[in-house]
Amino acid sequence: MPAVSVIVPVYNAGRHLPRCVQSIQSQTMRDLEIVLVDDGSTDGSARLCEELASADDRIRVFHKKNGGVSSARNFGIEKAKGEYLLFVDADDFIHPDMLSILFNGAQSVGAGIAACKNVRVREEEGLDAASKDTEGSFKTFSCTGIEALGFALLGTDISGSMCDKLISRELLGDTRFREGVLYEDALLASQLFPECDNVFVTTRRMYYYSKCPGSATMKPYDESAYDVVRIYEEIFKRVSTDYPEIEPQAEFRLLWAYYAAFDRMIASSDYRSIPEYSATLSYLRSHTKRVLHDPFFRVTRKVGAAVLRVNVGVYRQLVLKGGQ
């Protein structure tokens, strides 16, 4: 049984998959397997997966009907054999020391989850981008799972993504990614973190992600864009009931989610006709004072909240100019 299974969902990722797989093959930790899940690709990625596997016996390939990234990840979980799991998207890549640092860190404190930070890179950047980010200060510590969830909700020392986290299979159990929604990572994190006695954390940036033009969060607004509100409302309700000590962090993230959805809406020329527009605007205006007094919001967001309270048109110009 390998120590770590790295699960890579693959859908029409032929341009980036070799870079992704090479970064996993180059890990200083060798006790691993790479699980490539071809999610019904139509661009030749399926054949590329097989070619990569033929050159490295640590790679196993599975093909399935297209069902989305969560479906592919869940499929990979069922096929993976590792003690720990890592999820890497096919257009991203990882630092060569990521697995060894996270695995050893998890072992040292008996952590169910070991987390690092991520950093955005340009789509065309190569693996040498990892070597540019090894310098500088970072901190390493352990905390409780509830504390870790609080950090993740704030997006400070821990992100809301599951891709920059090593997860114990024992901890994961029967829990899976919710399929057919966006922000499924945040939901799974909110379910897993509280189950951990210890979480190992390093703020070293070792996961490199690139946002391609087709990414779901970069598309024009549609009904699925409101998933961010639905997911964080669900998380807020659970936190309020079960973990009230981090309720301020959950409330901050819920307000952030409303702004994230609203900002996607008003980027459209017909934003006033979007069904969720009026209710979202009303919600944000009713929480203006809460935002202004919230220590977790940036000054620019507070300024934007004050502007939105008075004039949507001016606020829209701020968003379109990148002022939020």
Image (tube, rainbow, N blue to C red):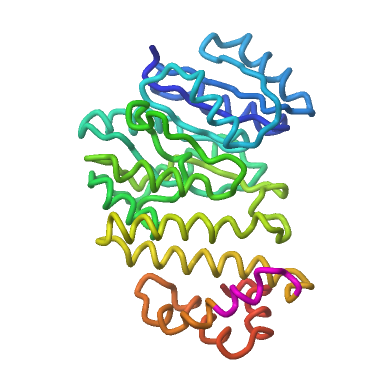
Identify the residue at image location x=65%, y=36%.
68
Pick whichever, 242 or 256, lies toward us. 242
> With respect to residue 140, does 303 lie above or below?
below
The reply to whether the magenta stretch includes residue 279 is: yes
**Horizontal relation, residue 186 to residue 105: left or right:** right
Q: Position of residue 49 (x, y in %)?
A: 66, 19
Q: Is residue 319 above or below residue 221?
A: below
Q: Which region of the structure is painted magenta?
A: 273-282
* Extreme-bottom residue of the structure: 310
For the residue pair 250 and 93, the one nearer the viewer reads as 250
Residue 109 covered by magenta stretch: no
Above/below status of 251 relative to 242: below
Dominant secondary structure, magenta: helix
Kindly identify the residue that appears in the image at 73 percent across and 59 percent down. Answer: 220
Give the residue drawn at x 38%, y 32%: 172
Q: How many marks?
A: 0
Name the side, left or right, on which 51 lies relative to 242: right
Q: Position of residue 295 (x, y in %)?
A: 34, 74
Please identify the quadrant where the C terminus is shown.
bottom right
Residue 161, placed above or below residue 5: below
